[in-house]
Structure formats: structure tokens, C-alpha cells
Amino acid sequence: MDASAVKPADIYGIERWGQGLLKVLESGEVGLVNPLNEEAAPVPLLTVMHELETRGIRAPVLVRVNAFLEHQLRRLNESFAEAIRAADYGGSYRGVFPIKVNQQAEVVDRIVTHGAPYGFGLEAGSKPELLIALSRRLAPDALVICNGIKDAEFVRLAILAQKLGITCVIVLESPRELDTVLAEARALGLEPTLGVRVKLTRQISGKWAESSGDRSAFGMTMNQVVEVLDKLAAEGLSHCLTLQHSHLGSQIPNVNEARMAADEAARVFVELTREGAPLTHLDLGGGLGIDYTGEHRAAPNSVNYSLGEYCANLVETVKFVFDAAEVKHPTLVTESGRATVATSSMLIFNVLEATYYDRATPETAQEGDNHLLQSLAEIPSYVSVARLQECISDATWYREELRALFRRGQIGLREMARAERVYLYAVERIKRVAAELEEVPEEIAEALEGYADIYHGNFSLFQSLPDIWAIDQVHPVMPLQRLGEAPTRRAVLSDITCDSDGKIDRFVLADGVHHALPVHDLREDEPYYLGVFFVGAYQETLGDLHNLFGDTNVVTIDLRADGGYDLLHEVEGDSIAEVLSYVEYDPRDALDAFKARVEAHVSSGGITTAERRELIALFKDSLAGYTYYEH
């Protein structure tokens, strides 16, 4: 993209992917838009960061925006309500949030609070998640959907929860699981509320295709479902089966795939009712996607539908099946985790330094230099729009040949260092001329991305953005400031870990996904902040302790009507002592061992007692300190 042909802020495509939650302000900063109050002035995210820093809450920091979460819950429930009204559907909608998508208490509690008016519930896929769900103050009409493999204790808790007025649905994943449920029900003298998870034959496309279809890990085949129906009938408990769960998929890119899967799920529902199952709820699982790139097309990081379209299409599809079969319309349930929380969180970090892959200062060959170096030094003299590709090819050729000579010992270290400086100056001239083009040819654009700088960020990819590393997930990334200035550089982002995989090299821009991010030159004594957006789903709970970088600082803010914000909640990031304890080190033992080592050097005369005091104090301070770079 020609940065000079558009407003600098437009390069990042925030109007395409920002969902109206973010905008570029006249100050050139990213602003948080209050979706619950159209009259409220946007809150500059850079202002939030500066004020957090004055409170002692340093970058990197995960910022959760409560208004974004509440807004998304409203949209989800009201969109289904509107679809049901428009289609004259006879049932209602009950959403549940899968706790695995974001298990943080602050997030789950706000979902419970904001979801209460809609009877919004929780999905638990493990015993710890069930304990979370049972301890929350859910609305009386909210569901707790129990998925996953369950032991006897899990089942017993779910059955007994009914005595507390909690509608806890045990979704059977296999015929064997039914045996466990029946045994616990007999022991308790209570009847369970049951669901059955049925595998669909339809498989969606995208990154999570294997979570759907008849080869998916969870759920039962038709043969196993019949076995369960027969066993329930023999036990006189057919009436306990009230819910069918058929997972459509995850991050479904194409709305027609969702339609086809919903059609099949409804057909299975019809057949189960004909077998005597008194089903009242159809759980269509997850699937509702997020358009991370703003491309609005069926692609791995995008979707070709809006939230309203998704809801309308599901309701219309299942209604047609139920009407044709003359089956009463059931309550529709979805487990839309990603769509609920993804947009509500963003990771903000500062850039520590940059490695530049060009050089503004001219560099020439010297007498006696290799002829290849002399040829390389001539390139800036003939760089032009017409010869741009020629210059790129020449620069690449001469540099590689010179490197080969160095490896064979035919040129020395200083001549090779001079060759690198000559090359970087040629690259600077090539970049400058390419910036004059209204449209950069694809081959040249790819070559320019190979010249991208490296901006070193104060974050750990593996801790805070694991899906970028593991499955090539794309999240929008952009600077928080100086958006009124044309970015003069393109960079890939490297994290603070000593691992070559700790980098981000795919970025959402207005014209698609690129391998370099437009950025500004770094200035002395002025922090340069970057934001990674829509990280609320999975990223907060999947991270590991690569290089022992722990959780970042976390804040939850709310946007006020006057354009300000309130700090609702703060969690300090992990200290080094806490991280060491996670991997089975005792910080006190480490301190004692260090003290003993230092004391031994005092005894031998290697250090003074004053130096001993300084070393031990520094060790203690480090144990209590942040795992990330501290200014």
C-alpha cells in the first residue's frame, strides 16, 4: 500500500475490523468508543496507559473494557431475540458462556452480571469449571451445561445442584457415561436432567475443522445415541432427556456451513422426538466467529456474515425443519464463547528498541575493495521507479556473493562490515523510491517486506498471545499514537523471549494481511506503544511460562458518559518469586542458597560486606519484581 495515498490512520483498517469500538482521534491516538452511550466522547487509550503508569501499573498490561463485554452480550441476546421475532419462531433463546474460553474470575463474574437479564448461563467442560459455575449467582432461568468427560463426583455435583434450583444439564458424551450417571442417580434417589451430544456428519472449514464432523473427539454416533435411548427407556428415565447438543464448529467462516450443520442438527432432533425423547432444548454449541481481519469473507481469520445474519439464518433453518415435521419449536441454546469475549480485551506493550534494516547515511566502497562491493555501492546512483526491480535483484545478488566470499575467507571482517553498510544504504534508497509508487507491484512489495525492521516489544508471545505462535491466528495490531503522521517504516515484532519463534509477522491492514506492520521511527524518551486487539478469547488462559515470563498486569476499566473512564479492577502481574514457585522452585530456598554463596565470597575476601548487602538486596528486589522489562 502507498502510505502517501491515504490518511496515515487509514492504513491500519481500523474502520473495517474495529466493530465501531475503536476509532482514530484527531490527536492521532486510538480511542475507546463507548458502545453503550453514543453521546460519550471516546477515551484515548494512550491516556489510559499514561495514567496506569503513574499508578505504578506498567506495560505490558492487558486492558479489559467492561462496556465492550456488556455491549457484546446485549448484541448476542438481542440479535437472537430479533431473529426469533422476525421468523415467528415459537421457542426462546438461552445462551451459555463456555468457561474454557476465558476462565478469569473477573471476566466470568461480569458475564454473569451482564447476562442475568437474559437468563445467560455457563458451560462447564471440567470439574473445576463446574465448581466455578455452581458458585456464581446465576439468574434463576440460566442453564449450566455440563460437557466433557465426567467422573462420579462431577455427576454427583451436577445432580445435587438441582436441589439448589440450578438447572444443571448433564450432557452425555458416551453410552458408558450414562452408566455412571444412572449409578449416581440411584445412590442419591434423584432423577438427573440429561442431554445427549450427537456428532453431526457435516464438517466446517477453517482452523478448527476437526472440532466438527463425525471424526470430532466428543459426542456420539447415531448408533451410540440409539443405545442410550434404549437404556433410558429400560430404566424408565426417557423423560429425563431434555436437551440435544450438536456442536456446529468453532470460528465458522462461512454462514452456509452453519446453516447446513444446523439443518442436520434439527433433523436429528426431530428423529429423537419420534423415538420418544421429550426434548425441549436444542444446543447448537459454538461456531459464531469474529472477523479479525475485517475482510468480511469466508477465510480462516474472517467470516462472511454479521451477528444478525448468523442468528437469523440459524433460526430460519431450524424453524423450517421443525415446521415440516410438525415438531414444537424448542429453546435454542448456543455456546458462543469467542464472540462474547474476544473484543473486550487488548494487550498493550511498549517497544524497547529497534533493529533497522536500512541506513540513511551514505556509504561508499574504498580503494582495494572487492569489485562486487564496488558494484553494490553503485546501486544508489541508478535507483529509479523504472529500475526498481533491477536494483532489488542487484542488491540481493551482490550481497549474497560477498557473503560467500567472506565464508571462504576471501574478504575480511571490516570489508564485510562495510559491505553491509553499503547494502543497507542501497535498501534505504530503494524503500524511498518505492514509497513514490501509487501501487507497488506484488513482487516488489514482497521484497520490501523482506527488508522489514525488527521492533523489539516488551511482551511474551507464548504467555499472552499463544494462538499467534501455535496456529497462526491473526489479531489486529497497530500503534496507539502518532496516527496523524505517515509511518516511515515497516517492521515485524519480536518479543522479549530469547526464542526465534517469539515474533509477530502477519498484520491486518486496510487492504489485507501483510508480513510487515507500518510503524514510526522511535524517539528518545518517548514510549512507543502498540496494541494487540481482540485477545479476550483463549489468549488469557492458554499462555505458558516460556523463559519464565509470567502473567502481565491486568486492569478492567469502564467508559463513562463524560468521556472519562473508571478503573474497576486491577491484578498485578506475576512476580519472579511467583513464577519460580509455579515451576517447583522455592524462592526462600533460592534466596538462602544465594546468601550462602555470597557469604562464602566474603569469607574468601572476594567481596566486601557492603557488596554483600547490595547483592542480597538486589536479589530480594528481583524476586519481588515484574518478570518483564522494567524502566
Image (cartoon, helix red, strand yellow):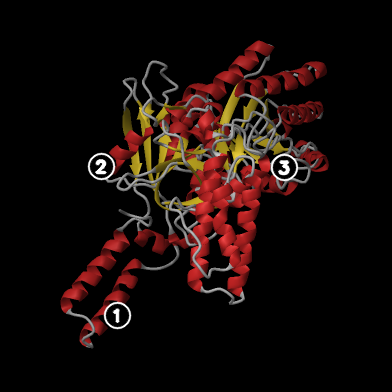
- Look at the image and tell me in which quarter the N terminus lies: top right
- Give the residue type at disc 2: Thr
Q: Nearer the viewer, mark 2 or mark 3?
A: 2
Quadrant assignment, res 550: bottom left
- Residue assigned mark 2: 54
Q: Report which residue position mark 3 lands on.
A: 209
Q: Mark 1 or 2 closer to N-term? A: 2
Question: Residue 597 got which mark?
Answer: 1
Q: Nearer the viewer, residue 556 or 455?
A: 455
The spot of residue 491 in percent (x, y) is 51, 47
Inspect the image, locate mark 3, and give the three-letter code of the amino acid beneath it.
Ala
Cα distance between the residues tagged 1 and 2: 38 Å
Q: Could you tell me residue 508's position as x and y percent? A: 57, 37
* Mark 1 or mark 3: whose residue is earlier in sequence: 3
Find residue 563 and report its image quarter. top left
Residue found at x 77% / y 38%: 203
Secondary-structure class at tag 3 = helix
**Who is closer to the viewer here, 239 or 516?**
516
- Type of residue at label 1? Arg
- The alpha-carbon separation of the residues under discs 2 and 3 comes to 46 Å
